[in-house]
Image (spheres, grey):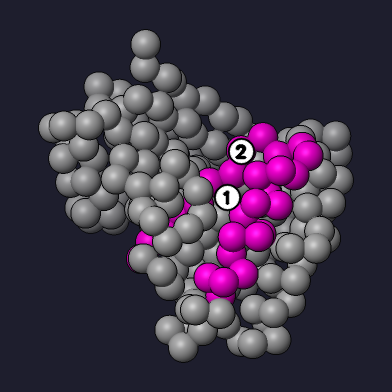
Amino acid sequence: MSVSHHPDIAVVVLMEYRTGLHLLWGWGRFLFGRFALQRWPGLRFAKVMGSGHEGGFGLRPSLTRQGLFCVFAGHQAADAFLDSPWLSRMEPHVKTCRWLKLEAYSSRGQWSGHEIRASAEPPVDEPVVSLTRASIRWSQTLRFWRMAPPAEQALAQAGGCRLSVGLGEAPVVRQATLSVWDSVAAMNAYARSGAHQQAIRAAYDGRHFSESMFVRWRLLAQGGRRAN
């Protein structure tokens, strides 16, 4: 059966590795994990990413935090991945591991030429997730990163933000921000705030991005573990 009729279901995995040999294991997965995922049944798109210091959005990288973003053809393929040994093998090596299962209700732009198809109904009185990612033009990196700290500070102080994490598939120029909100209203209040709105307007006016994607998701399920 063709997978084209299945909705795009995303799985995001956020992990913080233990140090020592566990960290070496994690970096090995970071470097080679995408090859192991290439033939995963029902997988449409995947990115293995690093994170900023303490999970933030900045130029200083984290040595212990990583993220995985996958898009599957339908719920069954996404659930099969979540139930697979791919996640369970990680448990001895991490301090924390958190996963989110998502379905987009609004999407525009592309990521490495891929689009996310929006298929969910807009949520009402339930948590929502925002993903913003961009490929920054080298000529615009200094201007872009000058605007990043005020926007990140506003995000950290925003009411209704349950989680925010900075991710990147390449240092400096390929960045993403994932945030989880209490509601659409809380997310929109931040999106229209001064620092964030000014950064977005300046980025587009200055054509900072060679490619960008903005997706809003329904949070279908979540889970994870924290080491004792």
Label 1 CA crowd tier, 10 Å (few <14, some 14–19, many 20+): some
Left or right: residue 19 compared with residue 51: left
> What's the distance in space between the residues labelled 2 and 1, CA to CA?
8 Å
Q: Earlier in the sequence, mark 2 or mark 1?
A: 2
Question: Residue 19, position in %: x, y?
Answer: 22, 31
* Amino acid beneath label 1: Leu
Q: Nearer the viewer, residue 225 or 34?
A: 225
Image-based side of 180 in relation to 59, left or right? right
Q: Mark 1 and mark 2 in contact (Cβ < 8 Å)?
A: yes
For the point 67% across and 35% down, the residue is: 162
Q: Tell me residue 199's x, y (percent).
A: 69, 71
Q: Which residue type does callout 2 highlight?
A: Leu
Q: Residue 53 vs residue 20: left or right?
A: right
Residue 199 forms part of the magenta stretch: no
Q: Residue 170 placed where, x, y %?
A: 36, 66
Please report the residue visible at 69 percent of the width from the left and 79 percent of the height from the top. Answer: 202
Residue found at the far left of this picture: 21
**Residue in front for this viewpoint, 11 or 201:** 201
The answer to whether 63 is drawn above or below residue 112 in the figure is above
Taking 46 as reference, is 147 left or right?
right
Q: Which residues are magenta?
A: 144-170
Q: Where's residue 113, x and y in %?
A: 48, 75
The secondary element bearing badge 1 is classed as strand
Mark 2 crowd level (few <14, some 14–19, many ≥20, 10 Å Cα): few
The residue that disc 1 covers is 178
Write the residue at 42% across / 61% down: 59
Label 2: which residue?
A: 163
* Residue most extreme to the top: 228
Q: Residue at x 70, y 52 (%)?
A: 154
